[in-house]
Amino acid sequence: MRKLENNELERLTVQEFKKAAKTPVVLVLDNIRSLNNIGSVFRTADAFLVEKIYLCGITATPPHKDIHKTALGATESVSWEYRKDTEALIAELKTLGYTTLAVEQAERATQLQDFSIKGDNKYALVFGNEVRGVSQAVVSVCDGVLEIPQYGTKHSLNISVSAGVVVWHFWMGFHT
């Protein structure tokens, strides 16, 4: 078995990415502190043709060298927008027909593996701060909560890991 070279991977150009049909998912980053986490989420969004990323509250925006370090150019391909108020954004996304889902540990949360993606729906997935998670105010205005099952001693996953797990679940739901 031979490892493939980058030029053998047949990836889209930035222009092709912008024209490509997108997975009907937007990501909402609610007060993310780590610039490296932000960049990693951009790379995940690029990998799975996510429509857009909303950077909210204290979440930093491109261009920034520490975002670029992990995004590796995905800030050029993935559409993004800054919004100060996450709650107001959630209300707006609902009016645009998105089902809004916080990724958090909460009462009556749906376990990710039990969540069925409806092919004609659009989804907004909200990921929260590295320490406090998605704020309670934002959880309260979302249509639901998704929880990633965990079986070890730690209480949470890194936000960039969580985004990868959840976006993969949605990608598979739309493409299988």
Image (cartoon, rainbow, N blue to C red):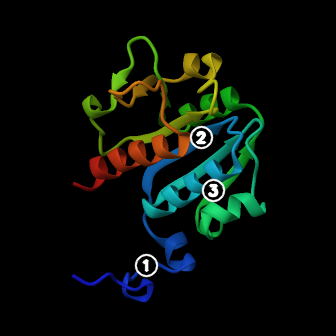
Looking at the image, the residue that sits furthest to the top is 107
Circle number at residue 28: 2
Residue 161, image x, y percentages: 47, 45
Q: Is residue 68 visible?
A: yes
For image coordinates 49% across by 37% down, the residue present is 98
As helix, strand or loop, the secondary structure at mark 1 comes to: loop
Q: Are marks 1 and 3 in contact (CB under 8 Å)?
A: no
The CA distance from mark 2 to mark 1 is 25 Å
Q: Amino acid at mark 1?
A: Arg
Q: Which residue does the numbered mark 3 point to in the structure image? A: 39
The CA distance from mark 1 to mark 3 is 19 Å
Q: Amino acid at mark 2?
A: Val
Front: mark 3 or 2: 3
Sooner in the amino-acid sequence: mark 3 or mark 2: 2
Sooner in the amino-acid sequence: mark 2 or mark 1: 1
Q: Horizontally, is 39 left or right of 62 in the view?
A: left
Q: Nearer the viewer, residue 161 or 143?
A: 161
Circle number at residue 11: 1
For image coordinates 38% across by 41% down, the residue present is 121
Q: Are marks 3 and 2 in contact (CB under 8 Å)?
A: no
Residue 4, image x, y percentages: 34, 83
For image coordinates 64% across by 45% down, the residue present is 54
- Please, is residue 3 above or below residue 129 in the view? below
The CA distance from mark 3 to mark 2 is 14 Å
